[in-house]
Amino acid sequence: MNETNEMWKQYRADMQDRKAERREKRIETIKSFCKKHNIDYKELTEYQIRINNEIDIFPTYPKYHNIVTGKRGNIRNLRNFLDSLIKTE
């Protein structure tokens, strides 16, 4: 029983590490995109980035919230989502 508990503890720790790595990669993608296109962004927390004082992105579980319109949703492809921001400006 103890061996099984240890296995699950290690599994949870591994999953948390993988989630943190994905979050960091998404944050880097957002930052580099914003810098490249001269878009204002602000890291409100390590789990939330605000773009142009208009859209909040939550990189851990890629979701967004447009604080102007109230629209929310999931981000399936972060790159396509970011590209859509510059097409609508």
Image (cartoon, rainbow, N blue to C red):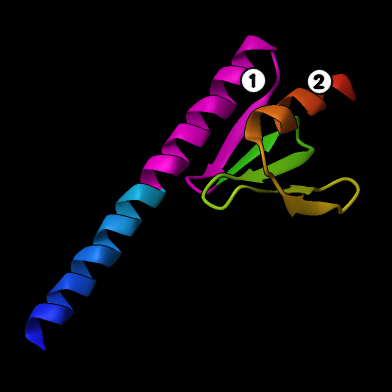
Q: Is residue 9 left or right of residue 80?
A: left
> Is the N terminus in the top left, top right, bottom left or bottom right quadrant?
bottom left
Q: Residue at x 88, y 45 (%)?
A: 68
Q: Which mark sits nearer the N-terminus, 1 or 2?
A: 1
Distance from disc 1 to disc 2, alpha carbons, whole Å, reads 10 Å
Which residue lies at the image location 26% right of the left edge and 56% below the top edge? 14
Identify which amino acid the numbered label 1 is placed on: Cys
Q: Residue at x 81, y 48 (%)?
A: 67
Residue 25 shown left or right of residue 12 in the figure: right
| Residue 11 image-quadrant placement | bottom left
Query: Which segment is the magenta one?
Result: 20-47
Residues 43 and 60: in front is 60
Q: Position of residue 65 (x, y in %)?
A: 76, 50
- For residue 34, the mark is 1
Q: In terms of secondary structure, what is the magenta stretch mainly?
A: helix
Q: Quadrant of residue 53?
A: top right
